[in-house]
């Protein structure tokens, strides 16, 4: 009985640790563009993308059940503008994010090409 309770506790603790790492909610900055390009993923499924003085507001959907995590963006001021991205955690505070700017579908991998941007982002404290 004690073993079963201990095993259940360990499974719950492991599940909590994994889910804590895989949430994209929070403030992120592009690693090689510190202080300029920022993304703020909010609990209400909105994303504020800031690049210098320019700001864009999106809604987002994140599919944490896929590997890598799939992120679908829709520009709020023009819902016809859609972007598809993939994301993977490198650590709790660092992710690799790849975004297809054409709206034609999710990138196949994290390799940048002409219409696909791939960046490393750090969680801001």
Image (cartoon, rainbow, N blue to C red):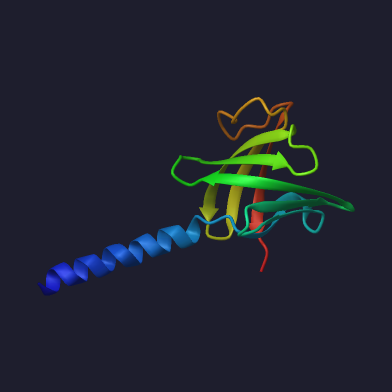
Q: In what quadrant of the picture does the C terminus appear?
A: bottom right
The x, y position of residue 56, in whole percent, is 80, 47
Q: Position of residue 53 (x, y in %)?
A: 90, 53
Residue lying at the far left of the rendered structure: 1
For this orientation, the residue located farthest to the right is 53
Compared across the picture, whether 102 is left or right of 54 comes to: left
What residue is drawn where x is 56% and y is 32%? 109
In the rendered image, residue 84, in percent from the top left (x then y), is placed at 63, 35
Please state the horizontal and vertical placement of residue 79, each as a whole percent of the image: 74, 37
Q: Nearer the viewer, residue 113 or 99?
A: 99
Horizontal side of residue 109 vs 29, given as left or right: left
Q: Is residue 68 above or below residue 89?
A: above
Quarter the N terminus occupies: bottom left
Above or below for 86 versus 56: above
The number of discs equals 0
Residue located at (13% from left, 70% from top): 3
Residue depicted at x 60% and y 58%:
25
Query: Which residue is at 28% across, 62% downward?
Result: 11
Above or below: residue 31 compared with residue 12: above
């Amino acid at each position: 009985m004690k073993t079963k309770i201990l095993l259940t506790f360990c499974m719950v603790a492991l599940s909590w640790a994994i889910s804590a790492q895989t949430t994209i909610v929070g403030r992120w900055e592009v690693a090689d563009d510190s202080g300029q390009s920022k993304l703020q993923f909010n609990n209400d499924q909105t994303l504020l993308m800031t690049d210098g003085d320019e700001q864009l507001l999106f809604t987002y959907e994140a599919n944490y059940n896929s590997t890598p995590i799939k992120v679908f963006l829709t520009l709020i001021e023009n819902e016809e503008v859609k972007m598809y991205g993939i994301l993977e955690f490198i650590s709790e505070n660092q992710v690799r994010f790849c975004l297809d700017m054409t709206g034609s579908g999710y990138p196949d991998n994290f390799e940048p090409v002409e219409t696909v941007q791939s960046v490393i982002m750090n969680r801001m404290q």
